[in-house]
Image (cartoon, rainbow, N blue to C red):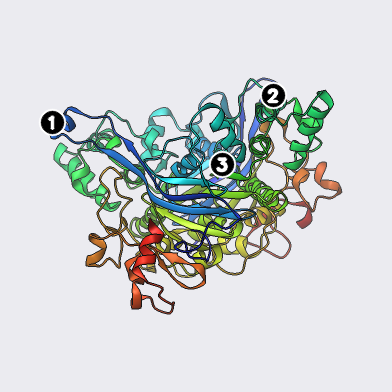
Amino acid sequence: MSAEPVLTISGLNVDYGTDAGAVHALRDIDLTLNRGEVLGLAGESGSGKSTLAYAVTRLLSPPGVITGGEVHYHRPGGDRVDILSLAPRRLRAFRWQELSIVFQGAMNSLNPVHTVHSQLTDVLAAHRPELRKRQRTERAVELLGLVGISADRLAAYPHQLSGGMRQRVMIAMALALEPEIVIMDEPTTALDVVMQRQILRRLVQLRRQLDFSVVFITHDISLLIEFSDRIAIMYGGRIVEQAGAAEIYRDPRHPYSDGLLHSFPALHGPRRELTGIPGSPPHLSAMPTGCAFHPRCGKAFDPCAGRVPLLAPPADGPGRAVACHLHS
Amino acid sequence: MTTSDHPGHAPSGTDVVLEARGVTKHFPLRRTARDLVARRRRSVHAVDDVSLRLRRGTVTALVGESGSGKSTVARLLAQLHPLTSGEIRLGGEPAVAGRGRSFRRYVRRVQLIFQDPFASLNPVHTVRYHLTRALKIHGRAGSGETELEQNLADLLNRVQLTPPQQFLDKFPHELSGGQRQRVAIARALGADPQVLLADEPVSMLDVSIRLGVLNLLRDLKERLHLAILYITHDIASARYFADTTLVMYAGRIVEGGDSERVTQHPAHPYTQLLIASAPDPDRVVAEEDQEETGTGEPPSLITPPAGCRFHPRCPKAMERCRTEPPPRFDLSDGQWAACWLYDGAAANGTEPVADPATAKEATR
């Protein structure tokens, strides 16, 4: 895969609150999404993964504030767009047109008093005013077809659809304008495994067909390993490790990544000993000093409590990065 | 039926603590004008003809998707709903809990742990209050302050919240999710029960702390010889944590047996679909090239399909599946499946024990 970036995030910082009591939800995030890839973003609650999605799309609502950093979108032609300084009108055009987002819990994202038809065509009416009514409906049928829903469900209200269908409608809506980037925030967490696999399989096919890039956010690392090309693991508002999916699975470098991988029981193969991670994730308002993971880390040593480890390639592994004093 | 012996002729062994026989629960729907005109009463067939046994010192997993009726089974076993039909036996005796004192006598032996520790603890009360109340209700508070204090400390030690003094006077919001769930478990242990019914005990917790809670439950099973029913949607965790696994689909148990056996050699097409759908980092075949694992969704339980409830989605459905509900067919190694594929000689590679009389009996 050619490593042509489509979205670059550098030094992004997000706080909740601006006074002395502000908590740092994201610190110094550097992340690149390449064209055509699925980038997995893993982390537990409070790790900042959803905040990252909101910050990048500038949907962060107060008290969340972006206090520093840059987010750039790279058009296919090559020119860069600075997302954080887009004027409101340009931003509205940019969202959904170039970058769309599928939120967690479709039941809450669809408007219960409007039909699927009116919600799908609404997107088109707002962004493609030149389309006629009939063309909009045709496109809506086409979109539903993409996600495997028959056209007769167009007239349905969200409550008449199952959870899986609602989630697929959300995906159809996100693809309505053929964006370059789709951010999916826990798109299948509320669904059963059978439906989850159906939806993700469809998504993988669509990505091949329509050629977009995906940021896939979830806490389920075994799902990420299977479906993403590259994975970034977040802990306490920072990215602690970033590598190819297979590399993370075979050879995790950060003790937290290793702990996460040993928290999931495997369905096949020999029964591995599961260790889990002692303690619980830190609260944003009481972040440990130094490496945020050190109180739970079995390999913590002197510098861990004092200095924050920087995300850097380990000596023997170019192409990946880890933020751990063990590897610096 | 959860282990190898056959339900048809096995008397309730001494180690069977709690048993469900042909338990059925239909929740009536509110009648609409149309129902009145049609003179019909509709109901949700939440649980149909479920039989299972919980044994001392074993964990039995009940695996199913949301809406399969697995939580209803837990509530029925906890006697929170009256049964539509069937029987629940505790220690070999038929148990009907009713209300008041007899209910309390029942819950002293059978305790339920809920999914959401954020909702199951009262936010205005301390850990001490929650646990003291459980101890007092079940008459285990002891006499005097020091004994109570000792019992409280014992409970917290048992769920590895140590040192106990550090936790006793905390409010739920001061605890993490994992700690809260441990308090909920300690509260259940306050009754000194024989059976723990754990309804998705870890699904609301962060990934890295789930394992700690599961290990705690396993440890309690071993030390206190508890019979544990572990309800989950995650079949991989059933493999790791449970001795026997039952798979539920649309209100019926479709397969059961040793956890390793059921997860490695699933017999029922639904179990096979479930396992093929679970995330698996070791999957080598690219997603696009895989054969379709299955489509469709679970049926409506108001008008469940006739015959086998899985037949509308089943790739191997036969004519018979559409009309006759399959009984349990015993396979090798104590595994069984409610599927016509295993009727008599059709069972490939396994010994068919398809004596229809005993098989029918098993589902009763």
Q: Which circle marks residue A49 in the picture?
A: 3
Q: Residue at x 29, y 36 (%)?
A: A158
In the rendered view of the protein, which quadrant contains the C terminus of chain B? bottom left
Q: How many marks?
A: 3
Q: Give the camera-side residue of B217 and B202.
A: B217
C-alpha gap between disc 1 and disc 2: 53 Å
Q: Residue at x 28, y 42 (%)?
A: B302
Q: Residues within 10 Å of mark 1 (few under 14, many from 20)?
A: few
Nearer to us of marks 3 and 2 is 2
The amino acid type of the residue labelled 3 equals Lys
Nearer to us of marks 1 and 2 is 1
- The chain letter under disc 2 is B
Q: Position of residue B116 (x, y in %)?
A: 55, 36
Q: Which circle marks residue B129 in the picture?
A: 2
Mark 1 lies on residue: B37
Q: Is residue B19 visible?
A: yes
A320 sits to left or right of B324:
right
Q: Give the camera-side residue of A79 and A48.
A: A48
Q: Give the camera-side residue of B145 and B272.
A: B145
Q: Residues within 10 Å of mark 2 (few under 14, many from 20)?
A: some
Q: Are marks 3 and 2 in contact (CB under 8 Å)?
A: no
The amino acid type of the residue labelled 2 equals Tyr
Q: Position of residue A80 (x, y in %)?
A: 47, 45
The amino acid type of the residue labelled 1 equals Val
Q: Is residue A12 visible?
A: no
Q: Position of residue B212 (x, y in %)?
A: 68, 48
- The chain letter under disc 3 is A
Q: Residue at x 39, y 66 (%)?
A: B358
- The chain letter under disc 1 is B
